[in-house]
Image (cartoon, helix red, strand yellow):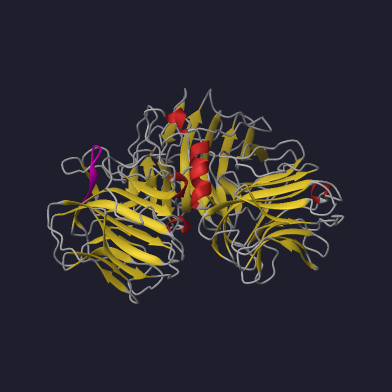
């Protein structure tokens, strides 16, 4: 939202609640925060079993771990602006407002305006349906599908690359009784005398026509029938919305595509919509393993395994349960397998079971006297890029599969356990099918305490699970040495990139790079794509050598890309480099000295700041749309960092520095 509105929101959060605690009023715009604090030498490559068995977990390839998990309340849905990208809803009278009052509201962070108008919510994909949209000039509007505009605000009411709370409210059909609000401010008044009855295929984020799709994030979309929630200027809520009386729809606020109203509509994902933690709300609690936990990221070519010598992960013939959260980014993803070394259903050393997502359908394959039995989720086409809670539970008579707390299929218990079956893998089956995505909280319980396979529903955890009695295995993925306090990213530590407690600016450590193959790699993330908007990228850097071209960060997919940039040194001066533009600072840096280095872009002006002083500036409105992010190397990789980086922070959508400033005197806040 605009700066003045956002300052008001920060004040409204009640900073008095944080007496004695430093809070960042713009933390909701922070998409990466790396302190590098931790144990000396720590990386993200050691995975721990927190059960009493303390199994040795072996990393094969570059599986990593971090803080993007299913827990917490701050979420949004990201739409890429493509014609077919949207969320669909079933037709329902809850969207037939008739001639009565209604309120439609949401937070929107646009990365670009649509060429015609971007639909935020449409009550139906047919003539006569209501459409809340944003025009190509940033006006907020009310339209009628197939007919045209009812009325708009003036241009520019909805800013790009900033969170905006938008609302349309009708009190009656009389003249000037329908109002448009942006960030709580009245931006348009008009007359809506329409009898809204068409509700054919309502949608969020697009109406499947070229030029009408939203590009950016939508969070906390709420539709209220029968009530004008706002009648005068107001301060938007600083916490996620709730299902007040009359709520027909409450969505884009969870770790999966769901409707949190009492209607609980089934939401269908079209195109590449994804669940993201980036949201308009700052967290009221800093990252902790007990509240947010951790996750493991698997890139489609790596996996974890251990040897189950005592066969405590058997699922056949006893009370037991396997559970995990999975965020799949590919249609087929192996979650776990247990077998004896042979990729068949041999009863001597074959497969005991494999749990997977196959062509977007959750399945469990298991050994039945040397042949394959199948437990198949009847729902096909499970949407990607969202979190699912998966449980397989068994007892003496029943084998059950649960998805998000609901038992979706059962079978008669009858798993044949091969004589040899000690190999357990996560992210790879007994052949060559891998996992692309995230796992969180893998837990196996054998005996009392396991999920009851006879129940039709189970309780989905809302906080990281623990090692209860009879826990055979627990992978919380919370052993990352370099982790993101913004709670959005799992970064791979490549080479010897690690925590150093000997050289640091703040806190207990920094990130150390020895210049010979060390760097951090973040899986592709729209949250680290700057687009054409404002941003701040900053860190403290300590170069043990300023020779050559040491890299701090690089957001390019390839070294020749113009859709991202490299931040590093050139001839001992700070440089921003792309193949189309180079900006070099005026100051020569020295080795073995801490420097605060910042890059900002504000309203098309790109600046380098060194220790709070502007060091270079140039006009720049490039759409930096690449979604990769490296720390300490270029994409090749080459031009490695030699030295230390402390307190690396990315602020998306906001330029923190516009004039000379005093560099930070303490570590950046964690909320």
Give the vertical position of 405 relative to 546 (above or below).
Answer: above
Q: Which residue does the image show at 12% across and 56% down from the upper left?
A: 591
| Highlighted range, magenta | 506-512
Marks counted in the figure total 0
Point out residue 607 in the picture as x, y percentages from the top left corner. Answer: 32, 63
Give the vertical position of 620 relative to 601 (above or below).
Answer: below
Residue 215 in sight here: yes
Give the vertical position of 499 relative to 436 (above or below).
Answer: above
Looking at the rendered image, the quarter that the C terminus falls into is: top left
Point out residue 185 in the picture as x, y percentages from the top left corner. Answer: 63, 49
Left or right side of 188 for 173: right
Q: Is residue 60 magenta?
A: no
* Residue found at the far bottom of this picture: 580
Q: Is residue 511 magenta?
A: yes
Q: Which residue does the image show at 83% across and 48% down from the upper left?
A: 172
Residue 7 or 356: which is nearer the viewer? 7
Give the vertical position of 184 relative to 272 (above or below).
Answer: above
Residue 351 in sight here: no
Point out residue 517 in the picture as x, y percentages from the top left corner. Answer: 22, 59
Left or right side of 20 for 394: right
Point out residue 469 in the picture as x, y percentages from the top left corner. Answer: 47, 22
Left or right side of 117 for 671: left
Residue 50 or 19: which is nearer the viewer? 19
């Amino acid at each position: 939202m605009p700066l003045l509105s956002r300052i008001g929101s920060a004040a409204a959060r009640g900073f008095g609640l944080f007496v004695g605690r430093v809070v960042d009023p713009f933390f909701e715009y922070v998409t990466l925060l790396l302190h590098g604090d931790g144990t000396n030498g720590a990386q993200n490559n050691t995975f721990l079993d927190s059960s009493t068995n303390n199994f040795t977990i072996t990393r094969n390839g570059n599986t990593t771990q971090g803080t993007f998990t299913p827990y917490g309340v701050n979420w949004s849905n990201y739409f890429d602006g493509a014609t077919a990208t949207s969320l669909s809803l079933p037709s329902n009278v809850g969207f037939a407002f008739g001639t009565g009052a209604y309120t439609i509201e949401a937070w929107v962070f646009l990365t670009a305006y649509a060429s015609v108008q971007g639909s935020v919510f449409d009550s139906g994909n047919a003539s006569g349906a209501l459409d809340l949209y944003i025009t190509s000039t940033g006006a907020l509007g009310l339209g009628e599908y197939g007919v045209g505009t009812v009325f708009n605000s003036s241009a520019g009411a909805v800013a790009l690359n900033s969170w905006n709370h938008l609302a349309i409210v009708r009190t009656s059909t009389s003249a000037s009784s329908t109002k448009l609000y942006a960030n709580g401010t009245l931006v348009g008044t008009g007359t809506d005398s329409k009898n809204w009855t068409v509700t054919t295929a309502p949608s969020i984020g697009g109406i499947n026509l070229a030029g009408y799709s939203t590009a950016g994030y939508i969070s906390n979309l709420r539709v209220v029938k029968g009530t004008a929630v706002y009648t005068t200027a107001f301060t938007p809520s600083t916490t996620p919305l709730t299902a007040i009386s009359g709520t027909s729809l409450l969505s884009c606020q969870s770790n999966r595509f769901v409707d949190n109203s009492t209607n609980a509509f089934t939401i269908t994902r079209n195109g590449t919509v994804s669940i993201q933690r980036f949201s308009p709300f700052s967290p009221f609690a800093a990252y902790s393993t007990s509240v947010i936990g951790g996750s493991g990221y698997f890139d489609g070519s790596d996996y974890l395994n251990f040897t189950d010598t005592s066969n405590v992960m058997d699922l056949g013939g006893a009370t037991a349960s396997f559970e995990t959260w999975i965020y799949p980014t590919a249609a087929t993803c192996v979650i776990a397998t247990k077998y004896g070394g042979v990729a068949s259903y041999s009863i001597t050393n074959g497969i005991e079971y494999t749990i997977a997502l196959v062509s977007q359908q959750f399945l469990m394959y298991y050994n039945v006297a040397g042949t394959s039995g199948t437990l198949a989720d009847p729902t096909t086409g499970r949407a990607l890029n969202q979190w699912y809670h998966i449980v397989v539970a068994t007892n003496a008579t029943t084998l059950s599969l649960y998805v998000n707390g609901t038992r979706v299929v059962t079978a008669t218990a009858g798993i044949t356990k091969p004589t040899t079956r000690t190999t357990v893998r996560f992210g790879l089956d007994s052949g060559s099918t891998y996992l692309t995505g995230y796992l969180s909280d893998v837990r196996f319980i054998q005996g009392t305490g396991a999920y009851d396979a006879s129940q039709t529903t189970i309780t989905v955890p809302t906080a990281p699970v623990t090692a209860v009695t009879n826990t055979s295995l627990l992978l919380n993925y919370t052993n990352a040495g370099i982790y993101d306090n913004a709670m959005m990213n799992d970064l791979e530590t490549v080479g010897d990139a690690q925590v150093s407690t000997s050289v640091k600016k703040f806190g207990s450590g920094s990130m150390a790079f020895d210049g010979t193959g060390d760097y951090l790699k973040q899986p592709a993330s729209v949250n680290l794509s700057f687009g054409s908007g404002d941003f701040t990228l900053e860190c403290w850097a300590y170069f043990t050598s300023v020779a050559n071209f040491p890299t701090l960060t690089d957001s390019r997919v390839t070294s020749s890309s113009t859709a991202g940039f490299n931040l590093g040194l050139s001839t001992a001066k700070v440089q921003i480099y792309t193949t189309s533009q180079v900006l070099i600072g005026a100051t020569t840096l020295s080795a073995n000295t801490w420097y605060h280095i910042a890059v900002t872009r504000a309203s098309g002006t790109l600046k380098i700041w060194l220790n709070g002083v502007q060091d270079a500036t140039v006009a720049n409105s490039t759409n930096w749309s690449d979604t990769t992010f490296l720390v300490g190397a270029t994409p090749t990789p080459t031009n490695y960092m030699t030295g230390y980086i402390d307190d690396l922070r990315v602020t998306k959508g906001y330029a923190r520095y516009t004039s000379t400033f005093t560099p930070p005197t303490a570590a950046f806040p964690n909320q």
